[in-house]
Amino acid sequence: DFDLSQLMSNADLAMYRSKARGRGTYTIFTPDMVESHKRKLSIANSIDQAISNNEFQIYYQPKIDGKGVIIGFEALIRWVHPEFGMIMPAEFIPIAEQGGKISAITRWVIEQVCVEMSVLRQRLQRRFRVSINLSGHDLRHSGLFDSIHALFIKHNINPEYIEFEVTESAYLENFALSNKFFRRVSNMGCAIALDDFGTGYSSLSYLTQISIDTLKIDRQFIRELETSERSRLVTGTIIDLAKRLSLTICAEGIENHEQWEYLLEHGCDHVQGFLFSKPIPLDQFDTLPARFERRTLMQSNL
Ligand code: C2E
Ligand code: MG
Ligand code: MG
């Protein structure tokens, strides 16, 4: 007593899950896959409308220097969907990438940061950088540099206030194009950071061939600082590596003072994490202190 086309489409959904996980796997269909597939489709189909209806929003997470002073913000996109409520980028960015919609989102983010820059400058009254995340798909789009350049001119943005973050895998998958793009962006005055460092490629030889300013140590290492001697060693080694290559080093995902202390002791330049602030919208900037105080511990747990 089943409908054959339904059976086939359910089997299809299970098959796509298997394909997404790689070879040699199987997946047993469960009804929640239909729901999740519908949500995905609906998200994919409402991206254009989200841009025109202004449903996206930028949240900013401060980046802090060794003295506890804010030196920049990472721009992190949020989507307040009319049906689903708040959707996080980890869910909709991959869908946008698959559906060829990421360039439009990236352009929206860059323009929105340009628009909000004057408010940010009023609030901070000193030099800082706003970091914008780029996806690997953006780097394959040859018009990206020109559209950034045009937006900076349109909104009168000093490129020295902007940084671009890209993961090492996105950079390396499009090596020649990325190198060309980032060299131009860097010549214009923007900074470049390699995001989620330590989780992508194991080959380090490319580090000598690319133009970047900052390595961002992935949150995974920071999370394990208290529990894993290996993570402590890898973190210390990444900081050392960055120093030797004259790169700035930023650690993400700092959630407690012990982690901050460890990173400071090992010479980490910048930190970012819930210990200081979650990503917040512009209208909550008043809640940020002028300076984050270090709590020196008599005995560190690390
Ligand atoms: P990411 O660039 O590595 O950003 C850091 C993520 O870690 C953010 O998640 C941030 O909220 C989270 N985070 C920061 N500090 C902590 C902490 O102390 N603890 C924990 N547990 N998490 C922390 P978010 O905003 O959900 O973004 C996830 C990812 O989505 C980003 O990772 C980035 O890859 C992507 N993304 C965000 N905004 C954009 C965008 O505008 N364009 C593109 N292409 N990707 C974006
Ligand atoms: Mg990032
Ligand atoms: Mg990251």
Image (cartoon, rainbow, N blue to C red):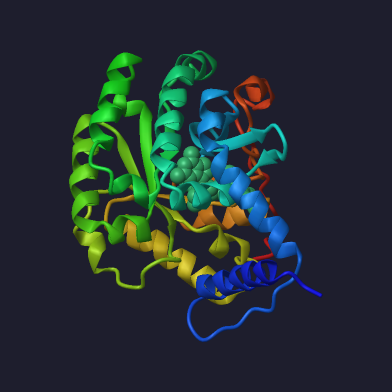
For image coordinates 44% across by 29% down, the residue present is 108
For image coordinates 50% across by 52% down, the residue present is 94
Where 195 sits versus 124, above or below? Answer: below
The quarter of the picture where the C terminus appears is bottom right
Q: Is residue 299 left or right of residue 132?
A: right
Q: How many marks?
A: 0
The quarter of the picture where the N terminus appears is bottom right
Q: Is residue 265 left or right of residue 148?
A: right
For image coordinates 36% across by 73% down, the residue present is 202
Residue occupying the far bottom of the picture: 24
Q: Nearer the viewer, residue 83 or 268?
A: 83
For image coordinates 29% across by 68% down, the residue present is 204
Residue occupying the far right of the picture: 1
Where 204 sits versus 243, above or below? Answer: below
Residue 229 appears in which quarter of the rendering? bottom right
Report whether residue 79 is seen: yes
Residue 290 appears in which quarter of the rendering? top right
Q: Position of residue 223 (x, y in %)?
A: 62, 62
Report whether residue 271 is seen: no
Q: Nearer the viewer, residue 4 or 274?
A: 4
Residue 84 appears in which quarter of the rendering? top right
Q: Position of residue 235 (x, y in %)?
A: 48, 64
Q: Is residue 7 left or right of residue 67?
A: right
Q: Position of residue 270 (x, y in %)?
A: 47, 44
